[in-house]
Amino acid sequence: MTRISVIGCGYLGAVHAASMAEVGHQVVGIDTDAEKIALLSQGKAPFYEPGFDELLRRNVESGRLTFSTDFADATQAEIHFIGVGTPQRPDGQGADLAYVHAATDALLAVLPDHPERASLVAGKSTVPVGTAAALAEKFSAKGALVAWNPEFLREGFAVDDTLRPDRLVYGLPADPEQAKLAEAKLDAAYAKILSGETYEGRDWTETPKVVTDYATAELVKVAANSFLATKISFINAMAEICDATGGNVTTLAEAIGYDDRIGKKFLRAGVGFGGGCLPKDIRAFQARVDELGLNETLDFLSDIDAVNVRQRSRVVTKLADALGGSVEGKTIAVLGAAFKPDSDDIRDSPAVDVARRLIAAGAVVRVTDPKAGPVVAKYAPDLPFVDTVDLAVDGADAIAVLTEWTEFRQLDPVEVAGKMSHNIVLDGRNCLAKQAWMHAGFSYLGMGQ
Ligand code: UDX
């Protein structure tokens, strides 16, 4: 058992804290948001994530997992995981490190000076390359070590990705003695995960571990997300070409995907990527590389970003064309607000952006989503939200499916048709049974099909 603190209890930190308790450690989660800490302390998840509720409740009840707003409660820990957010700067493309600095400064203030056993600060947040080295300098004053240990969890699969990750990456100090100490601490924290014990009920498998320096570990994360973003924008560019030529992007993706150098995953064309990671990470990566004087190296990421954002305007144009040239005065049901299904996260969500573009173009919009309602009310109160699909489609001229929730994919088009004024469906995620919707009398608009 290792004593662990996890600083920052958002989608990443809260799941990490509960998972560390699940594998037997004594964990305290720290966050400055008192409301969030109050909920977590009662074993209540402050956001929607499948499986997280149970994991949280179980570990809070066992006493292995506590939460606090007071950094002093972290001082007993041997490892401090940093899981605070690094959003896009309000005034530019780079990452805003304000939360990283606030968290690490608060931790520095309470850490004892040069205790017998050095503690380890393990960064999990996505940061610009060079951040870990700068923090290591600061923490050396207290005799604490720094490692960078990026997190690759996907929302909607966060619990599984944390307990059964496809790899662990350790960015360790350059000094070999310090590196050995830091590695041993991370190994202790991840012992069960590394050995494959957490793969219960599946084929037994060990988790691959990649041991490297700070810079590589920091870069692995942004490189991975840039590659994923590139795959999505690539297939969305193909979708645009399919729209112009009568091709079918879903078949195209299947056909190229049989080549295992390309692979089938992350080639779903549609309204594009959103969320708290991909969009801001490709921008921050570019901004950091510009700072390093490599101004042209990641220019292609601007195009990836532009292709992505263009899908949102393509949805509006497709709807306008189908509605006789304009969406003005038309009632449009927007199905989906979350940036992807099985999440209530609406950060940089294509669905939210499209809804706002439709409103700006004069449409009467009704948004619905099975889980994101409370988040929309809090962070996007400008959007007219209704609780059910029935309310959204009632008398509508068109519906736009922008998040592929199972509930939307399984809608009965005949039933939906009976409630609408005009039968136009825009399938922004290519997730509906096209033939069934057409048979029910819908004009079906896909993305590249
Ligand atoms: C991503 C990375 O996958 C994860 O490894 C990293 O730790 C954080 O960022 P996440 O933001 O949870 O995870 O979502 P992800 O599943 O990657 O999807 C991102 C966006 O891309 C979503 O809006 C999704 O709808 C979209 N997407 C995904 C597509 O449009 N097409 C695809 O084929 C796949």
Image (tube, rainbow, N blue to C red):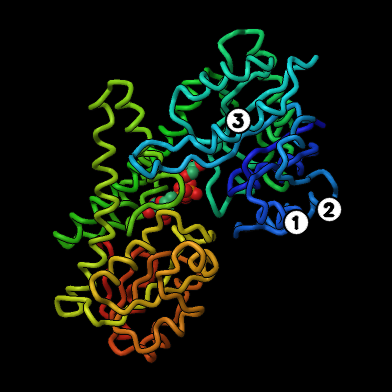
Q: Secondary structure at mark 1?
A: loop
Say if disc 2 is inside 8 Å of ligand 1. Answer: no
The residue that mark 2 highlights is 61
Please determine whether, in this image, residue 371 is positioned above or below residue 227: below
From the viewer's perspective, is 313 left or right of 113?
Answer: left
- Quarter of the C terminus within the rendering: bottom left
Q: Secondary structure at mark 3?
A: helix
Q: Secondary structure at mark 2?
A: helix
Q: Quadrant of residue 4?
A: top right
Please determine whether, in this image, residue 97 is positioned above or below residue 419: above
Q: Residues within 10 Å of mark 3 (few under 14, many from 20)?
A: some
Is label 2 in contact with label 1 (beta carbons under 8 Å)?
yes
Q: Residues within 10 Å of mark 1 (few under 14, many from 20)?
A: many
Say if disc 1 is inside 8 Å of ligand 1. Answer: no
- Quarter of the N terminus within the rendering: top right
Marks 2 and 1, Cα distance to the nearest angstrom? 8 Å
Q: Nearer the viewer, residue 162 or 437?
A: 162
Q: Residues within 10 Å of mark 2 (few under 14, many from 20)?
A: few
Q: Residue type at mark 2?
A: Glu
Picture residue at 72% right of the left edge, 28% below the top: 110
Q: Earlier in the sequence, mark 2 or mark 1?
A: 1
Label disc, if present, on residue 104 of the rendered structure: 3
Q: Earlier in the sequence, mark 2 or mark 3?
A: 2
Q: Report x, y in % for residue 248.
A: 25, 60
Picture residue at 32% right of the left edge, 56% below the top: 269
Picture residue at 69% right of the left edge, 42% below the top: 30
Please determine whether, in this image, residue 126 is positioned above or below residue 403: above
Which of discs 3 and 1 lies nearer the camera? The answer is 3
Picture residue at 32% right of the left edge, 51% below the top: 253
Q: Nearer the viewer, residue 320 or 268?
A: 320
